[in-house]
Image: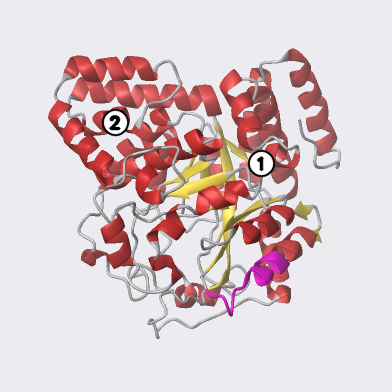
Amino acid sequence: MCKYDPKSSKAEEFIHDGEIRETLEWAAANRDDLPLIESVIEKAREGKGLNHREALLLLDCQDKECNEKIFALAREIKQKNYGNRIVMFAPLYLSNYCVNGCVYCPYHYKNKHIPRKKLTQEEIAAEVIALQDMGHKRLALETGEDPVNNPIEYVLDSIKTIYSIKHKNGAIRRVNVNIAATTVENYRKLKEAGIGTYILFQETYHKENYEKLHPTGPKHNYAWHTEAMDRAMDAGIDDVGCGVLYGLGTYRYDFVGQLMHAEHLEAAKGVGPHTISVPRIRPADDIDTKEFPDAISDEMFEKIVAVLRIAVPYTGIIVSTRESRKARERVLAVGVSQISGGSRTSVGGYTHEERHDETAQFDVSDTRTLDEVVNWLLGLGYIPSFCTACYREGRTGDRFMRLVKSGQIANCCQPNALMTLKEYLEDYASEDTKIKGEKVIAAEVERIPNEKARAIAREYLKELHDGKRDFRF
């Protein structure tokens, strides 16, 4: 019988079923213990996070007054660590060829309805130009798992193509990669190719359910998949991103597993995940969400994000265009720090929009253009940020976390966010977005904590207006 060990390199020891079940029982037994809940909230106010048991207790809390304190604290921590900044990105789907049998994904190999498509390097270049014309600087590269059609060499060539395209004032400055679990050797190749964050969703941490949901293909191997982040970090990739697909299993189990994975990376590798994603099961070709009875409500979704923000205060939280405008607005306030905009989840969707319904991985709820999303964020008082400076300056992994925990990151992130927003306004924004954005910049530049950084930012903003580009702290 394996024992729970967050430092272990074995999946079933750091994601320990017995520990998760004991945690579920403990939280359920104590959900009405208000003095205990209050003590956990007070501990969380220190801003150093919570363990998986404490976090589940807050998630399970039913008391109205305590829940109000939980949401207020989440907003406070979000504001302290991230300010009003919201990082923008877009997914880029290269290929929907896949050999896995995942029952919740239309890419599964038995699906004969969906046309299979793999972009050539020329088509990738065209997609990148289309994304640059929107104003994007950061992409998340996506592809199905197929050793023949999507080998690592294809991914590496695609990254090289993406970084090589300089169109007008456009450039992709950070390519995050979301591909299937692979070897340490291949992760080294990705590191050498200059990727930003390596992202891999666990989907569910419940081993038995995981194997049923992935009945065939390489992804069926629970340990190989769950231990992927360890191999990526062993290969030198500093920033990794985790996620579960809420609705595949019971949310309480996966919530605990998600935090245990973060605790494992902190204990075993010295730094937790750079980002955590919170997608929910969505309709798609050949996929009926009625077959997944564990789907979560908007209210529970919002609370999951809020408690994650409290439990892992320095980890970015990502929400995608799976979510509606209304749902995204709710979670932005309590914890989300990155969102996609103007996204297409189909292969070739940025240059051939008619393909959108044919090759899409899931239905997009927020179908607004990037400019409409930026305009909306500005209207809500946020700073849409296209910043990639920390990655390009080597402030990744534990170096990034040290800056965040010390509070010094604000003297980098605030001016960088404003300068990349200024670039967007000068080169891509509609007139209304530009007017709103200039007002936000004028107000927010005064909030840069360091006087010297504030003065330099003002000068850089002037030079950006005069036509220069790509300043960073």
* Percent x, y of residue 69: 30, 20
Residue type pointed to by label 1: Lys
* Percent x, y of residue 145: 51, 71
Residue type pointed to by label 2: Arg
The span from disc 2 to disc 1 (Cα, nearest Å) is 46 Å
* Percent x, y of residue 224: 45, 59
Looking at the rendering, the stretch of residues picked out in magenta corresponds to: 146-158
* Percent x, y of residue 34: 18, 18
Q: Nearer the viewer, residue 194 or 14?
A: 14
Location of residue 239 with respect to 115 vertically, above or below: above
Q: Which mark is residue 386?
A: none
Residue 83 appears anywhere in the view: no
Q: Quadrant of residue 350?
A: bottom right
Would residue 152 be counted in the magenta stretch? yes
* Residue at x 48% of width, y 75% of height: 98
Q: Nearer the viewer, residue 468 or 150?
A: 150
Location of residue 331 with respect to 292 vertically, above or below: above
Left or right: 340 in relation to 235 = left
Q: Which mark is residue 434?
A: 1
Q: Which mark is residue 53?
A: 2
Residue 308 appears anywhere in the view: yes
Q: Nearer the viewer, mark 2 or mark 1?
A: 2
Left or right: 225 in relation to 237 = left
* Residue at x 60% of width, y 19% of height: 406
Left or right: 304 in relation to 250 = right
* Residue at x 46% of width, y 46% of height: 9
Alpha-carbon neighbours of circle 1 within 10 Å: few (<14), some, or many (≥20)? many
Would residue 354 be counted in the magenta stretch? no
* Residue at x 77% of width, y 34% of height: 472
